[in-house]
Amino acid sequence: MKKVKRLRVKRRYSEDFKQARVKEYESGEFTVIELGKLYSISPQIIYRWIYKLSKLNKKKVVIVESKDSSTKKLKDYQQRIDELERIVGQKQLKIDYLQKLFELAESDLGFDLKKNIGSLPSDGITKQNKR
């Protein structure tokens, strides 16, 4: 069996696309590595765009990426997790409250409300309520 050589697909990016990625980098929204993973682009290519298109970063200048953007994202994710945990906790309290309410109603009425939730009350109960 012959080995088939795969052709490389050469991708071309528009100037607008390149400038948008450079702006995302300069704003601190994403790091070069994150942009590379997000758009499936080699970090070296993104660095070339930065050197070519950025007003802030030129060649022969070392680019030191701040970890602030990653740290900020982690903090934002942690805040969201905390908020969701709080919401889940509130919902669990409501569920526990309703379950206790069902238990108390069942002990007072003498039958399982959960099983009879969709059915009409029997004659025994309606007669008791009429008295």
Image (cartoon, rainbow, N blue to C red):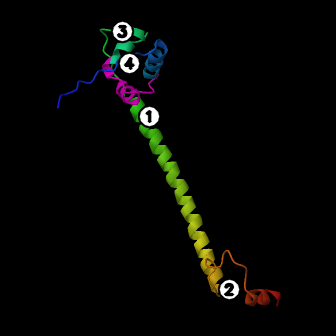
Confirm or deny contact between disc 1 and disc 4 (CB under 8 A).
no
Measure how far apart labels 1 and 4 are at the Cα level: 32 Å
Q: Secondary structure at mark 2?
A: helix
Question: Can residue 67 be found in the magenta stretch?
Answer: no
| Above or below, 76 relative to 27 | below
Measure how far apart labels 1 and 3 are at the Cα level: 26 Å
Nearer mark to the viewer, of 1 and 2: 2
Task: Pick whichever of labels 1 and 3 is earlier in the sequence.
Answer: 3
Along the horizontal axis of the image, is 81 left or right of 50?
A: right
Measure how far apart labels 3 and 4 are at the Cα level: 24 Å
Q: Quadrant of the N terminus?
A: top left
Residue type highlighted by circle 4:
Arg
Residue with the mark numbered 4 = 11
Confirm or deny contact between disc 1 and disc 3 (CB under 8 A).
no
Confirm or deny contact between disc 4 and disc 2 (CB under 8 A).
no
Question: Which corner quadrant of the image does residue 98 belong to?
Answer: bottom right
Residue 49 location (% of width, % of height): 38, 14
Category of crowding for the residue at label 2, using alpha-carbon neighbours closer than 10 angstroms: few (below 14), some (14–19), many (at least 20): few
Along the horizontal axis of the image, is 120 left or right of 90?
A: right
Q: Quadrant of the C terminus?
A: bottom right
Task: Pick whichever of labels 1 and 2 is earlier in the sequence.
Answer: 1
Category of crowding for the residue at label 4, using alpha-carbon neighbours closer than 10 angstroms: few (below 14), some (14–19), many (at least 20): few
Measure how far apart labels 4 and 2 are at the Cα level: 73 Å
Q: Secondary structure at mark 4?
A: loop
Residue with the mark numbered 2 = 109
The residue under the point 29% across, 8% down is 60
Magenta segment, which residues?
A: 27-44
Category of crowding for the residue at label 1, using alpha-carbon neighbours closer than 10 angstroms: few (below 14), some (14–19), many (at least 20): few
Residue with the mark numbered 3 = 58
Residue type highlighted by circle 2:
Leu
The mark found on residue 72 in the picture is 1
Task: Pick whichever of labels 1 and 4 is earlier in the sequence.
Answer: 4
